[in-house]
Image (cartoon, rainbow, N blue to C red):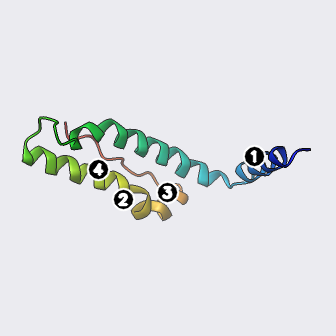
Amino acid sequence: MEPEQEQEQEQKQETTNEPPEYWILYYLRNTRNSLLAATDKYLLPDYPISQENLEIMKTYRQELRDIININKEDILNGMPIEIPKPPF
């Protein structure tokens, strides 16, 4: 087997050997990243947004970034968490 194929095989094994609770973290990270990507436009310097709404959006985006770190124990223990809703 080629070295690249062996490395891919090892990575697949590592991924499938992760405990199931870590899959929820993977899902939440992907969801969070999608929500962040959807709001990137609001931070562009030429996007027409008021300073007040810009601050609201920055706060929302920070809440998204913090959601996993703040709630990691609850997530791993199967507790439901609430994903912040977009402000507009």
Q: How many marks?
A: 4
How far across and down, in percent of the image, does residue 17 sit? Answer: 75, 53
**Element class at badge 1:** helix
- Mark nearest the camera among 4 and 3 is 4
Task: Give the residue pinned by disc 2.
Answer: 66
Tell me the crowding category of disc 4: few under 14, some 14 to 19, or many 20 or more residues within 10 angstroms, Cα based: some
Asked whether the residues under the numbered discs 4 and 3 touch, taking CB atoms below 8 Å apart as contact, a structural biologist would say no
Label 1, residues with CA under 10 Å away: few <14, some 14-19, many ≥20: few
Pointer 3: what residue? Answer: 75
Q: Amino acid at mark 4?
A: Arg
The x, y position of residue 73, in whole percent, is: 49, 64
Looking at the rendered structure, the kind of residue marked 2 is Asp
- Chain-order first, disc 3 or disc 2: 2
Along the polypeptide, which appears first: circle 4 or circle 3?
4
Element type where label 2 sits in the image: helix
Distance Cα–Cα, label 1 vs label 2:
29 Å
Image coordinates of residue 16 in percent, x first then y, are 73, 48
Quarter holding the N terminus is: top right
Of circles 1 and 2, the one toward us is: 1
Q: In the depicted view, which residue is nearer to us: 87 or 49?
A: 49
Q: Earlier in the sequence, mark 1 or mark 4?
A: 1
